Amino acid sequence: MVSGIYRFILRRVLLILPIFLISSALLFSLLYFKPGDPASELAGLQAGPGQVAVIRRDLGLDKPPHLRYLEWLGAVFNGDFGTSWKFYRPVSSMIAERLPQTLILSFAAFVVSVGIGIPLGIIAALKRKTKVDYICMGIALLGASIPNFWQALMMILIFGVWLGWSPGLGGGIGLEYLILPAITLGTALSGSVSRIMRSSMLDVLNQDYILATRAKGLKERTVILTHALRNAFIPVATLLFMRLPWLFGGSIIIETVFQWQGMGWLMIEAIRANDFLVIQTVALMFVVLVIVANLLADISYAYLNPKIRYGEER
Amino acid sequence: MSLKSIVNLLAWIKPALRSISRSPAWLYLKRDIRTWVGLALIVTIVGTAIFADFIAPFDIRERAGDPHQPPGGRYILGTDHLGRDVFSRLIHGSRSALMVGLLLVSVTGSIGITLGLLAGYYGGKVDGAIMRAVDIALSFPGLVLAAAFVGFFGSGLRNLIIALSLTGWAGFARVTRGQCLAIRKEEYVEAAHAIGEKPRTIMLRYIFPNAVSPLIVMITMTLPVAIILASAMSFLGLGVPPDSADWGAMLYQAQGAIKDGIWWPALFPGLAIMITVLGFNFFGDALRDALDPRLRHGRHG
C-alpha cells in the first residue's frame, strides 16, 4: 500500500493539470476577447493588407480558436513560444534570459524577509507585552503598510541620489545591483513573517514540553533555539510558500523601478510595446512558477503535518 | 430615495447605535488604542476627500507656477514637472484612492459573497465548481493577471477595476462559504425551510445577516489592499490616466525627475497612501480581535 504522504502528493500533482489547462486557456483566450483586430493593430498604420495577413497567420487568428489553442499548447510543451513581433526575437530565448533574474531576485527577497522577520518575531515573543514587543510589532506593521513601489523610489532617492551610490540608481546586473531591489521586495513579507513568527512562538512557549525542557534545567538559549524554534517555524514555512505568488506579483513593480532584467520588467516592456505574444507567455510562466510554489507548499505542509504523513486525513 | 424611507432609516439609527454600544465587541473595541488611531486616520482621509475643493489652494489641472518649485512659500509641498501644485493634487488624490478602493471592494465583495452563499448553501457540485474556481483564482498572482489584462484591453478606470476583480473576489467567496456552511445547520434555517421559504430568501434574509461580522472585518482588511493594488497599477501606468490627481499616477509621473534630486513630487503621495493604509489596518486589526471571541481575552497580547 502506498503510504499517506505519497498518495497526498500524487493527488496534488494530478490537480496541477486541470489548473494549468484552465489558466492557460484563459490567458490564451484574452486575444480573442480583444475588441478590434489585433493583427492590424500590431502591423501599424503603414502596413499593407499582405503584411496584416502574414501577422494574422503568425498569430493563428485565421484558424478556429480551439484548434489554435491545442496547436499552441503543443508548441509550448516543445519549448516553442513563437517569435516576438516587436522585439524580433524568439520568445523562448527572451524568457530563458529573464527567468533566472526573476528567480534570483525572488530568492534574495525571500532571504531578506526571513533574515529580518524571524529574529524580529522571536524577540517580540520573548519580550511579550513590553516596550520591545511594541516597537518590534510597530516596525512589522510599518513594513507591511509601506507601498513597495514608493519604497523603491525612496530607496533610489536616498541611496542612489543623496548618498551617491551608483548601483542604487538601478539598471545594472550583478550583486551590488541586487541589494536594494531585494530589500524592497522583502520588506513587506518580513512584516507578515514576524507577526506569524511571534504568535506561533507564543503558542509553542505555552506548551507543556517547553515547561519540561525548562524543568530539566536546560539553558533558556537552548530551550528557545533548539526546542521551541523548530516547532514554531512550521506556520512560518507555510506562510512563506503561500506568499510566493505575491512575491512574483511584486517583482513586476520592483523590477520595473530598478530596471532589473527579469520577467516582471519584460512584462511591462511588452505591455508598453503592445506585444501580446510576450505578455501572454510571461503571464503563463508566472502561472507555472506559482503552481510549482503551491505544490512545494503543499508537500512541505504534508511533511510537517503528521496527520497527513500517516494518512489519517484525506 | 423617498422622504419616508429616509425617516425610516433615521428611526433605525438610534436603536442600532444603542445595541452597538452595548455589545461586548464594542466594549473591547473602545479600549483598544488601535481603534482610535485607526478611526482618527480614516476620518481625516474621508474628511479630506469630502472637503477637497475647499482645502486645495490651486486648480489641480492648471499650472500654478514654474515647474519643480521646492516646497515652502506659496506652494506648501512644491510643484510638479508641469508646475501644478503638489499639495492640491495630494488633497484631491484622497478622492481617487477612496473611490477606486470602495469600487473595487464592492465589485469583488458582491461577486465573492454571492458565489460563497451559493457554494455554501447548495453544496455538492455547485460547491465543487465554485471552490475549484476559488483555488485557481487564489493561485494566480493577481497583479500579473491584472497587468496582462490591461496589456490586452487597455488602461483606464473601468479596465483597472475589472482587471483587479478577476482574482479579488475569491477571498470573499471562501470566507462567505465557510460562514454559510456553519449557519446552514442552525435551527432557524431549518425552521425557514420548514415553513417553505425560497432558497433565495433563506440565503439573503437568514444566512447572510448572520455571516456579516466576519465579512465586515474582511472588507476593512481588503480596502487597504485594494487601494495599494490600484495605486500600484496606476504607478506602472496601467491604471487611471497618468494625468489624474491620483497618488499612484502622481508617483508614476514623479519617477522621471527623482534622479535629478526632485524628491517632493515622489515623497508625499507615497506617505498619503501609507497613512490611509495604516488607518484601515489599525482599525481592521482591532475589529478582527474584537469580533473574534477566541482572541478577546488577549492570549496573544
Image (spheres, coloured by chain):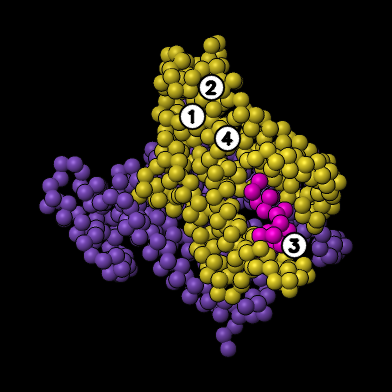
Chain colours: A purple, B yellow
Kindly identify which residue carries mark 4: B273
> Residue B240: x, y in percent?
44, 37
Residue at figure coordinates x 49%, y 19% from the top left: B59
On residue B245, the disc is 1
Q: Select label 3 or label 1 by which is in front.
A: 1
Q: Select label 4 or label 1 by which is in front.
A: 1
Q: What is the crowding at mark 2: few (fewer than 14 residues within 10 Å), some, or many (at least 20)? A: many
Q: For marks 4 and 2, give the CA distance.
A: 15 Å
Is disc 1 in contact with disc 2, using a CB cutoff of under 8 Å? yes
Kindly identify which residue carries mark 3: A227
The residues colored magenta run B203-220
Q: Is residue A184 visible?
A: no
Mark toward the start of the polypeptide (4 vs 2):
2
Q: Select label 3 or label 4 by which is in front.
A: 4
SS for callout 2: helix
The part of the image, by quadrant, that contains residue B3 is top right
Which amino acid type corresponds to the residue marked 3 in the rendered image?
His
> Residue A6: x, y in percent?
56, 79
Q: Assess whether residue B214 is covered by the magenta stretch.
A: yes
Kindly identify which residue carries mark 2: B88
